[in-house]
Amino acid sequence: MDFLALSRDYTHSVKLESRVKKFGTDDLLPLWVADMDIASPSCIQDALAKRAAHPIYGYTIYPEEYYGSITNWMQKRFETTIEKEWIVPAYGVVPSINFTIRAFTQQDDGIIVQTPIYPPFISSVRKHKRKLLENKLLYRDGVYSIDFEDFEEKAKKAKLFLFCSPHNPTGRAWSLDELKRLVEICQKYNVLIVSDEIHSDIVYTKRHYPLITLAPDSTILLNAPSKTFNIAGLNTSYALIPNKKLRIRYQQEQLKAGLGDGNLFGIEALISAYSSGAVWLDALKLHLQANISFVNDYLVEHAIPIKATETQATFLMWLDCRAFGLSDEALEEFFIHKAKLGLNSGVSFAEAGSGFMRLNIATSQEVLAEAMSRLHDAYVNIK
């Protein structure tokens, strides 16, 4: 199965058409925003084409197939049994994070995030005037781990924990022991867990453990097929909430925003992806693993002083560039104007990301080869 990088010109792509806004120039290779340059699987293309052939695109319901495809996917991919009533259709994981903050916390309540972290975790806390409790991940010998002592101190002052599993941007797939310890601490201090598991399908040699299997009464799990099958533009996600009281409160908050109707094409895409996309996904993961190996090997073979953390999950590589000895501003300038590469700056994931850059490798190896060549040439010229 070939995974080619397709041209996204004239498709209103954020990755391409926001380059000037993001980087101040469009003269660079964009490898930042977390979607893929790879076509969605043919099963999704066929399902959307079939539905588009009917020329009425009106209000739609969530059919039984929608719920059944999610329950079957969770069982087959994660050996996790869920009930239909746990499923709350949603518009997107980030909106759902905001709904949980509004539903379960009040102004000045403490919310734990583990930095470096996907930027909307932090912005969602701050814009709702909650207290940000930053549990910085420990970084030793190229591996990230959880500072449990600090986490417990923060849990004493928290109402909610925004968890990212697998973790973006570090690529960690959390172990069962780590998850159990987090759950134990949160339950000890009555902290609600909101677990963003949108990258859970793209885990490599490790195993993903859905957090609702460990703490069903105190966890809201947020997920979507968007990262997995490259359909983020269809704005379709879901929450899994076993606890009925929590589920009702969440649903009420979501309905306050007027988000009760589904995305017609998003529903079709989700059903098709979860019903027929498994073989494609398995092949995609092999392609992504090859890309990760390619980048790591290139950095070593060309003696570029950048080391990627072990990418256990996601299609995002977290690059430790601190050996360059540059400030964060200078490092970003180097990538944009010298290497002509558009990556995410590490400090956009909080101060804990200082000296790092995030690279999206969900493209073809030819594109990555060009990116690495540009990086090498730029590095040689500043040595």
Image (tube, rainbow, N blue to C red):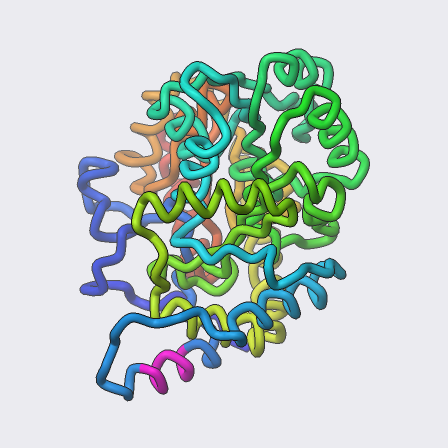
Residue at coordinates 37% horizontally, 79% vertically from top-left?
48
Instruction: Answer with left or right where residue 128 lies relative to residue 137.
Output: left
- Residue 149 versus residue 86 in the image, above or below: above
Toward the right, the furthest residue is: 177
> Residue 274 or 284: which is nearer the viewer?
274
Region of the chain picked out in magenta, as a range: 45-51
**Quarter holding residue 74:** bottom right
Q: Is residue 68 visible?
A: yes
- Quarter of the image with the C terminus is top left
- Residue 54 versus residue 269 in the image, above or below: below
Q: Is residue 379 visible?
A: no
Instruction: Answer with left or right where residue 19 lies relative to residue 235.
Output: left
- Residue 92 versus residue 110 in the image, above or below: below
> Residue 246 or 81: which is nearer the viewer?
246
Q: Position of residue 164 (x, y in %)?
A: 57, 38
Instruction: Answer with left or right where residue 223 lies relative to residue 155.
Output: left
Residue at coordinates 39% horizontally, 30% vertically from top-left?
124
Q: Position of residue 137 (x, y in %)?
A: 62, 23
Q: Position of residue 65 (x, y in %)?
A: 53, 76
> Residue 333 or 76: which is nearer the viewer?
76
Residue at coordinates 67% horizontally, 43% vertically from top-left?
173
Q: Position of residue 201 (x, y in %)?
A: 61, 57
Residue at coordinates 41% horizontally, 51% vertically from top-left?
92
Instruction: Answer with left or right where residue 81 lies relative to residue 334.
Output: right
